Image (cartoon, rainbow, N blue to C red):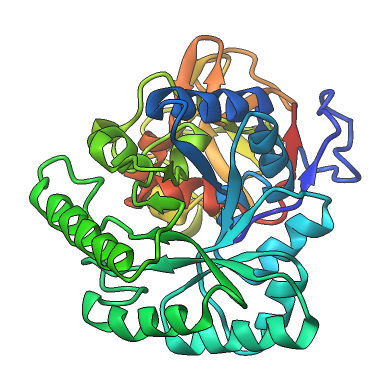
Amino acid sequence: MMGAPSARKQHKGTGQAIDGQLRPTYARIDASALGHNLRRVASHVGEHCRVLAVVKADAYGHGAVDAAQTFVAAGAWGLAVSLVEEGVALREAGIGAPIVVLGGVYPGSQDVIVHRRLTPVVWSLDHLTMLAGAVRRTGAQPCPVHLNIDTGMSRLGARPSELPALLDWWVADGGRTLRLEGAMTHLACADDPADDISSARQLALFSEALQGLAARGLKVELRHASNSAGIVRFPEAHLDMVRPGIALYGAAADVKVELPGLRLAMAVCSRVQAVRELPKGSRISYGGTHVLQRDARVAVVPVGYGDGYPCAMSGKAQMLVRGHRCNVLGRITMDVCMLDVTDLPDVCVGERVTVMGRQDGETLGIHELAAWADVIPYEVTCGISKRVPRLYG
């Protein structure tokens, strides 16, 4: 399951290619929704708190370059990626806003980071020495970095006990090669409405660590801890900057922690490829797991797990045709799935199908698809594959 390049041509109807693709399956990205969501987050956290828009993993499947440009235009202070390569792609697209690389400094990446004016997250002496060496070799200006402090996620970051050695290095460097612009932590349980204690403990540890930095004369400009769920649940953790990810795309890890007023930015659409008239007792798709209990009209839709429509949704998923929910029959295959359109007279080849999104007043939302597939909502949009073009409009 991977991200996809974006396309800008609009789908005109049957018989019209989408940037050379004849198959009518595509994901429409609502750029106005992306901008709206960024502004909604900014309004929620207030004018004194900056927004670092997370566009890693191809902007959660929405197209990193287009999404990044939209977020910057809507007022984002900067952008966050996971990989140096993702940051380079944004720079090559002409984006000049700050780009924070959350994934750290891999050996060999330090020269690219400095050359491309990226802002790496650091948490080890190896990171500091590699970056400092790159700055000295190139004669570049001091490289801005953000210190990741592990307060309980136990993933990446410096444990509080490891901080003294890092602070000693910074004091000795005196800002000649690296500029400590920010300090961050990541909340492990922000999306769990029943768990306030874990996040409160993490925020207390983060505050203590920041006091330790200040005691050594290392005052940071940007303190940040809140992801999308933290923005909603912990106003005290907004600090100087927040890092929304899934909220910018109109969703949340759980509906209970969703910021009100967001708009889902992605819709996945297709059209009926074929219509079959099948008698009662016909077995549908691989394994014949679904047996028709009546004579039926079955539409074949060119969407399958090769497009990121998980086979795990077989027997549960629905799609919209003419604003009505139609059941997906049998196993979802790599390239197509079968849809029961018996109760919709005269459905024909070329009929519009909505896989996710709104159609004629009815909605199939991201949380519903995630429940059918037994995944988290992030996986729904991130999983839409390369062969599904993204259309901005």
Quarter of the rendering containing residue 46: top left
Considering the image in quadrants, where does the N terminus appear?
bottom right
182 w.r.t. 242: above or below: below
Q: Position of residue 277 (x, y in %)?
A: 59, 30
From the viewer's perspective, tell me whether residue 201 is left or right of residue 283: left
From the viewer's perspective, tell me whether residue 243 is left or right of residue 69: left
Q: How many numbered badges does the structure rendering display?
A: 0
Considering the image in quadrants, where does the C terminus appear?
top right
Q: Position of residue 99 (x, y in %)?
A: 63, 56
189 w.r.t. 297: above or below: below
Q: Position of residue 56 (x, y in %)?
A: 57, 56
Q: Between 348 and 103, which is closer to the camera in this rendering?
A: 103
Quarter of the rendering containing residue 293: top left
Image point 47% across, 15% down: which residue? Answer: 362
Residue 1 can be seen, yes or no: no
Q: Position of residue 227 (x, y in %)?
A: 37, 47
Check the image and name the residue furthest to the top.
Answer: 361
Q: Between 82 and 310, which is closer to the camera in this rendering?
A: 82
Image point 66% across, 81% down: which residue? Answer: 110
Image point 49% across, 90% down: which residue? Answer: 126
Q: Between 178 and 116, which is closer to the camera in this rendering?
A: 178
